[in-house]
Image (cartoon, rainbow, N blue to C red):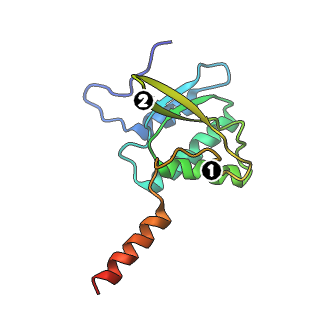
Amino acid sequence: MAPVSCSRNGEFITNGDCVRAHTLTASVYSHPLVLEQPEIHLHPAAQLGLADALINAVHTRHIQIILETHSEHFLLRLQRRIAERMLTPQKAKLYFCEFRKSESQLTQLQVSDEGEILNYPQDFFADPLAEAIERRKATLKHK
């Protein structure tokens, strides 16, 4: 099956429109839905909504979604839904891709039933607590 482009001459179709259209028309009998950074140009709150919509599509449309993202918001929502038992770690296979020795290498991330990533790649996302502590130190230093 050839990739489907969501852009047309003279029309403006957003990533979100494209994702919605594909999840609504996909079924268990179709090919996997492959999405590359669907969060681009979305507000962080909309990224959370997109994650929920895709989780819903997996459950209601029985489709497989292969998604590449750089969104910490998206990943945090998946982790939360796993902790809430709305999604299982078995249904949400997570992989980390990195370029090593002139080739891409995939590492499957191990996710607990509580949504914790047990083998989280070091320094992949900023540590929000460390950032808050350093910001506070800087504030106190300049008072």
Q: Nearer the viewer, mark 1 or mark 2?
A: 2
Residue at (71, 47) in percent of width and height: 112
Q: CA distance from mark 1 to mark 2?
A: 25 Å
- Tell me if 56 is positioned left or right of 51 in this view: right
Which x, y percent locates residue 75? 54, 47
Say which residue label 1 marks. 79
Residue at (50, 47) in percent of width and height: 122
User: For this rendering, which residue is in front, 70 or 57?
Assistant: 70
Q: Which mark is residue 99?
A: 2
User: For this rendering, which residue is in front, 19 or 82?
Assistant: 82
Please state, as top left, top right, bottom left or bottom right, where the C terminus lies in the image: bottom left
User: For this rendering, which residue is in front, 50 or 73?
Assistant: 73
Q: What's under tag 2, amino acid-wise?
A: Phe
Q: What's under tag 1, amino acid-wise?
A: Gln
Residue extending farthest left: 10
Q: Which mark is residue 25?
A: none
Is disc 1 placed on a helix, strand or loop?
A: helix
Which x, y percent locates residue 90? 72, 36
Q: Quadrant of residue 95?
A: top right
Crowd rating for badge 1 (residues with CA inside 10 Å; few <14, some 14–19, many 20+): many
